Amino acid sequence: MDCLLIKIFLLYLVIRQCRPSRVLELSDKFTEIRKDGAFWLVKFYAPWCGHCKRLEPIWAQVAQALSGRNVRVGKVDCTRFPSIAEEFRIGGYPTIKFVKPDGDHTYHGDRTRDELVNYAIRMSGPPVQEVTRPESFNGIKRDNRLFFMYVGAREGPLWDVYFDVASKLQPHGFFYSTNEDIAKQHLDVGELPAVFVYKESLHYFYSVDSGTNVEEAENLNQSLHRWVNEERFETFPKITRGNMNEIMQTNKYIVLVVVEEDKIKRIPAHMLKFRDTVEELVRKKRGKYHRYFQFGWVGSPDLANSIAMEKLPLPHLLVLNSTTYHHHIPDDDPTEMTAEAIDHFLWRIINRSVPAYGGNSIPVRLYRTYFEGRAALGDMWKGNPILTAVIFGLPFGFLSLILYSICCADILDADDDDDDYEYHAKRE
C-alpha cells in the first residue's frame, strides 16, 4: 500500500512538472512585440539571482491567476538579452514592470501572488472604473478590502481632482465611480458629489462644496490628494520592506509593533498579546490617532532594527517620523505597558515631549549602512559559516598575498643592492 502511494505521488510530481507554464519566455524581440496593443507583466531576472529563484513559483501562480484576463505574463533573462535590460532601465534583479504599448511602470510592492495579481488588474484597466449595476457594488466589496468611490456626475472640480488622484495612484489602489441611484441602494450618501473610502467594512466620507474659483480649486486639489494618501492603507496593516516606502508617503508618524513570525507565520503568545493590545487601542481611539499616526505591525525584526540601528528586544514598539526620519521608543518594557501607558506614550509624541533618535543626517546614514552590513554579515555567518569564510577569506587572502609580494620584493631588492655593495667593497 505504501509503495502504491509513493508511486502515485511520484506520478503526480511528473505530471505537475510536465504541465506547460503560462509564463512566456521573452527575447530581444519583445521590443517589437510590446507594440501589438497587449498589456504585459514582465519579470526581468538573472539566473544566478537568489531572489529571482524564490520568486519563480510565485510568478507561475500569478500567470495562472491572470490567464483569463487581458494581461500576458512573461520573463526576460537579462544576462542573455542585455539590450532589453538597457532599454527598460533595469538596475537590479528581479525587476517587475507592467508594460503597455506606450510606456511601462515599475512595481515596488510585496512580491506575493495576491499583491501582484491585484496590481496587474489595476494597471490593465482605466484609472477610475465605472460601476453601472447595483449588484457590482457588492462584488467590489467582496473582492477588495479597501477602495475609493466617487458618487455623482462625472464632471466638475471634484471629479477632475479625483480622476487626477486616481491616475497617479492607480498602481497602489482601486478607484471607482457610480451614480447616486446605485450608491443609495447601499449606503447613505448625503450631499453630492462625494468621495468615500471603504475599508474594514466601514465607509469614511470626504465631501466638499464644489467651488469654482481658482483658490477653492487649489485647496480642493491639495486637500483631496492629502486625504486619499492618508486613507489608502488599512488601520493596522502588516508592514514589510515592500510597502514601507509607500506608507512613508502618508507623512505621518509610523507606529510599528515589532514581533517575530516563524517560518509558518506563527507568532509567540506573549508577542501576539502585545500586538492585540495595541490594535485594540488603535481601533477604539481611531478618531484621536488617525490624523497623526499610521499604525501597523512587522513580522520580522530586521526592518525595525535597521530603523533603530540596534537590536530591539521583542516584542517592541517603535515610532518613526516619516518626514524627519527620527524615531522614538518607549522607556518602559513594552511587555509591561498597559493600554493607558501606550496611549500616554503616543500622546507625548504628538506633544513632542519624548526623546528623538536617528534622523537623516550623513553620519546617521553612514552608521545605518554600517549597521545593516554588519547585521547581514552576521546572518550569513549563522546560516553558512564555511561559505561566508570562503567568500570573504579568499579576497582577503589574495590581497594579503599581493601586499606581501610587493613588500618582500622591495626588501629583496634592497638585500641584493647591499650584497652588490659588499662585493665591490671587498674587491677594492
Image (spheres, grey):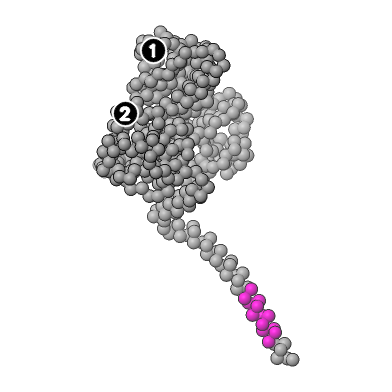
- Mark 2 = which residue? 285
Q: Which mark is residue 268?
A: none
Q: Quadrant of residue 294?
A: top left
Nearest to N terminus: mark 2 or mark 1: 1
Asked if residue 47 is among those painted magenta in the image, a careful observer would answer no
Measured in 3D between alpha carbons, the distance from the residue under mark 2 to the one under mark 1, in whole angstroms, is 25 Å
Name the residue type under label 1. Answer: Val
Q: How many marks?
A: 2
**What range is drawn magenta here?**
410-422
Q: Give SS at disc 2.
A: loop
Above or below, comparing residue 85 to residue 72 in the picture: below
Mark 1, Cα crowd under 10 Å, few <14 / some 14-19 / many 20+, is many
Q: Is residue 86 above or below residue 39?
A: below
Residue 258 lies in quadrant: top left
Dominant secondary structure of the residues highlighted in magenta in the image: helix
418 part of magenta stretch: yes
Quarter that holds the C terminus: bottom right
Quadrant including the N terminus: top left
For mark 1, give the secondary structure. loop
Residue 344 occupies which quadrant of the picture? top left
Few, some or many residues within 10 Å of mark 2 (<14, 14–19, 20+):
few
Q: Where residue 313 sits in the image (x, y, percent)?
A: 33, 48
The residue under the point 45% across, 31% down is 250
Residue identifier under label 1: 189
Q: Is residue 88 left or right of residue 331?
A: right
Residue 321 percent location from the top left of the image? 43, 38
Give the amino acid type for the residue marked by disc 2 in the picture: Lys
Which of the pair 319/32 is nearer the observer? 319
Residue 13 in view in this figure: no
* Residue 117 percent across, percent down from the top left: 44, 29
- Residue at the image position 68 percent from the left and 80 percent from the top: 417
